[in-house]
Image: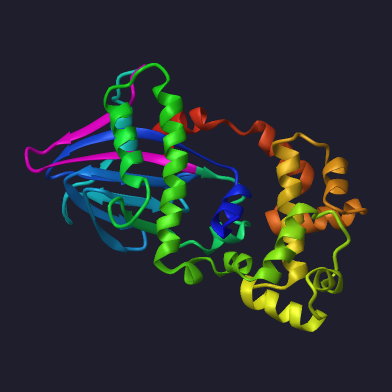
């Protein structure tokens, strides 16, 4: 299996459109920080995106911009224009219809789709931690399906039919995969060097063993023996390819797997602990807190209380 597929299959992710924006210059939109990655797709026209740190990028038709941490930002037809709150415009949308916002300045026209990607364990997964805060790709800049996905999402948002909401959510999930593929194609080693461990036959074999059976009592020596390498050579090559030691990678893999069991499979803390190879609840709790910042029980409770994507879309009215 290719490295990116392995990485993405270990991430729980979903996407959803928030609104369609029809804008004529001069226009400016201000979006507050949001609890998910926020994306904008420029369907026509052009504009600028400015982050809260002051970074400014030009957006043209076909561009996709993703703010991976959901950080506060502004969109504008040109610098210096008045900024209108995105949340305020959302409050005037017609209930029961796909949200459409607009600013009529009388000038050049621009159309955008705005949405979010919800990514579980964003602060702990090595791929997500390695990605930049702002990703900027163009639908036609290389091979892939971004352009087709954008066209389908555009059609569904412009003229919603029964099932459009579910379909656009699926399209957004596929869009995220394509955006990450495009980002990694630019400089994959700089963006996420750890996934290249899978390109090394022996390190890749060790990674597969860890992912397939994280509960086993692996040591550096046992992993090295399983892939026919000496302990020292294996440890050195693993660290060079993956960016961290075998035991550190194993520990993170176990905790991420435990979190998945607590969430998706609704296992008890004790069952999840045993499934990933821990025998002591205190050591499991310490490791879980070290990687995810909370206890296993706290994580399990928070996931039960969390809302699905529909709730996040509704929350966007007040949170963006």
Residue 6 is situated, as x and y percent measured from the top left of the image, at: 61, 54
Relative side of 186 to 271, left or right? left
Relative side of 302 to 102, left or right? right
Residue 35 is situated, as x and y percent measured from the top left of the image, at: 50, 44
**Secondary structure mostly taken by the magenta-highlighted segment of the chain:** strand
Asked whether 312 or 234 is in front, the reply is 234
Q: Quadrant of the N terminus?
A: bottom right
Which corner quadrant of the image does residue 197 belong to? bottom right
- Residue under the image location 33 percent in, 27 percent down: 156
Q: Outermost residue toward the left?
A: 106
Which corner quadrant of the image does residue 29 belong to? top left
Q: Is residue 302 above or below residue 218?
A: above
Relative side of 40 to 79, left or right? right
Which corner quadrant of the image does residue 171 belong to? top left
Asked whether 27 or 267 is in front, the reply is 267
Q: Quadrant of the C terminus?
A: top left
Observer able to see residue 128: yes
Magenta stretch contains residue 314: no
Asked whether 200 or 95 is in front, the reply is 200
Q: Is residue 239 above or below residue 93?
A: below
Relative side of 13 to 218, left or right? left
- Residue under the image location 21 percent in, 48 percent down: 61
Observer able to see residue 289: no
- Which region is colored magenta? 96-117
Residue 314 is situated, as x and y percent measured from the top left of the image, at: 45, 28
Residue 5 is situated, as x and y percent measured from the top left of the image, at: 56, 52
Total numbered labels placed on residues in the image = 0
- Residue under the image location 73 percent in, 36 percent down: 301
Magenta stretch contains residue 115: yes
Q: Outermost residue toward the right?
A: 279
């Amino acid at each position: 299996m290719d490295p990116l597929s392995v990485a993405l299959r270990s991430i729980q992710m979903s996407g959803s459109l928030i609104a369609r924006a029809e804008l004529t210059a001069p226009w400016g939109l201000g979006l507050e920080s949001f609890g998910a990655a926020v994306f904008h797709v420029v369907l026509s026209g052009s504009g600028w995106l400015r982050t809260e740190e002051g970074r400014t990028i030009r957006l043209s038709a076909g561009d996709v911009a993703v703010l991976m941490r959901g950080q506060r930002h502004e969109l504008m037809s040109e610098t210096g224009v008045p900024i209108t709150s995105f949340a305020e415009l959302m409050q005037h949308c017609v209930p029961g219809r796909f949200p459409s916002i607009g600013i009529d300045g009388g000038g050049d026209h621009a159309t955008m789709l705005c949405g979010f990607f919800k990514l579980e364990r964003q602060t702990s997964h090595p791929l997500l931690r390695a990605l930049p805060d702002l990703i900027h790709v163009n639908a036609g800049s290389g091979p892939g399906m971004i352009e087709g996905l954008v066209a389908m999402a555009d059609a569904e948002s412009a003229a919603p039919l029964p099932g459009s909401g579910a379909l656009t959510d699926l399209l957004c999930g596929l869009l995220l995969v394509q955006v990450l593929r495009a980002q990694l194609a630019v400089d994959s080693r700089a963006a996420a060097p750890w996934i290249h461990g899978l390109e090394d036959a022996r390190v890749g074999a060790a990674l597969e063993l860890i992912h397939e059976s994280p509960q086993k009592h692996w040591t550096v020596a046992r992993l090295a023996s399983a892939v026919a390498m000496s302990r020292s050579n294996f440890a050195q090559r693993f660290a060079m390819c993956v960016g961290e030691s075998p035991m550190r990678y194993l520990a993170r893999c176990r905790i991420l797997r435990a979190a998945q069991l607590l969430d998706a499979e609704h296992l008890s803390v004790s069952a999840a602990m045993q499934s990933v190879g821990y025998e002591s609840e205190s050591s499991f709790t310490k490791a879980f807190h070290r990687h995810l910042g909370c206890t296993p029980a706290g994580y399990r409770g928070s996931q039960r209380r969390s809302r699905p994507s529909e709730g996040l879309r509704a929350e966007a009215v007040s949170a963006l």
